[in-house]
Image (cartoon, rainbow, N blue to C red):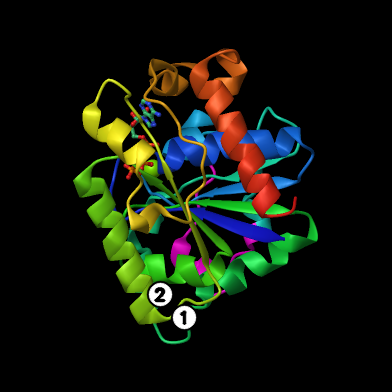
Amino acid sequence: MQTIAFYNLKGGVGKTTTAVNIAWHAARWKHRTLLWDLDPQGAASFYLGVDGSRTYKTGSLIKGKQQIGNLRVETRWPGLEVIPSDISLRNMDLKLAEPGAGRGSLKRLIEPLSENTSLTLLDCPPTLSPVAESIFAAADYLVVPVIPTHLSLRAFEQVMQWLDQKAFKHLTVLPFFNMVDRRRLLHVEMLVKPPALMRQRLKTWIPYSTHVEQMGEHAAPVGEFAPHTPAARAYRGLWFELAEKLKL
Ligand SMILES: Nc1ncnc2c1ncn2[C@@H]1O[C@H](COP(=O)(O)OP(=O)(O)OP(=O)(O)O)[C@@H](O)[C@H]1O
Ligand SMILES: [Mg+2]
């Protein structure tokens, strides 16, 4: 099982939308895929048309009193399951600070999923808290959406510095440009001459597109309701690039 976390310290950059579109592609390519919505806002579950009616307690999950496998919910796409978000995730920091928990908690939690999952995707909240540390310890790959602006790059730089300090050596960090608007000079400049920080990026970039915004309306990935659009093509390209990197 390989684990990919869709993460950025910065909010609203496209973590959830990307996680959902990549999860959908992975399942279409017959990878048994599970998306864990780790954000108490629950946007990933919503985009996949799964409601969060089956609640759980993050605390008892971390303590092993609740089995993670029981939280899996099928989506309407074969091979794609979700662990919906729960409001108790907002206390995850506190729960991870309790004795016996700690940085390895999330990794321990998801390990049993490998029995019937080949790809676990984590949709992460925008934070650099102990939750993020636990995510970094659990993930093999960190996919980081970056908007081609200085502020967004700065947030990514902070993440990289933090990863360095905390010595997460096992983690492969894969940033990519999202919400690219080619009418903007800065966006074009960054695409043509990417900053050093983006050297190891995924080369596919996702354009700014109303079709991505419409995911909420359709409660579905872009490829499902607007398959022949630039955004759908870009997500497909991103999936292929990622699949090649992960040797899927
Ligand atoms: N390529 C894109 N083009 C246009 N809009 C986009 C694109 N990617 C994301 N968005 C929009 O930007 C908003 C934020 O996207 P998303 O929820 O995926 O970000 P996020 O990083 O998960 O946010 P949060 O930090 O709140 O979890 C959403 O309204 C989404 O529709
Ligand atoms: Mg999100």
Whether residue 164 is in magenta: the answer is no
Which residue in the structure is indicated by mark 1? 101
Residue type, numbered disc 2: Leu
Q: Quadrant of residue 220?
A: top right
* Element carrying mark 1: loop
Q: Earlier in the sequence, mark 1 or mark 2?
A: 2
Is 54 left or right of 176, judged from the image as shown? Answer: right
Residue type, numbered disc 1: Ala
Q: Give the CA separation, mark 1 to mark 2.
A: 5 Å
Q: Measured from the top left, where is residue 175 in percent x and y?
A: 44, 51
Q: Quadrant of residue 116?
A: bottom right
Farthest residue in the bottom direction?
Answer: 99
Could you tell me which residue is drawn at 62 percent across and 39 percent down? 239
Within-10-Å neighbours for mark 1: few <14, some 14–19, many 20+: some
Indicate if the residue with disc 2 has its beta carbon within 8 Å of ligand 1. Answer: no
Could you tell me which residue is drawn at 66 percent across and 39 percent down? 240
Could you tell me which residue is drawn at 57 percent across and 55 percent down? 4
Please tell me whether residue 200 is drawn above or below residue 190 in the rendered image.
below
Q: Which residues are magenta?
A: 53-68
Query: Dots 1 and 2: beta carbons under 8 Å?
Result: yes
Indicate if the residue with disc 1 has its beta carbon within 8 Å of ligand 1. Answer: no
Whether residue 61 is in magenta: the answer is yes
User: In which quadrant of this rendering is ligand 2 seen?
Assistant: top left
Residue 147 visible: no
Q: Please, what is the dominant secondary structure of the magenta stretch?
A: loop
Q: Could you say which disc has been placed on residue 96 in the image?
A: 2
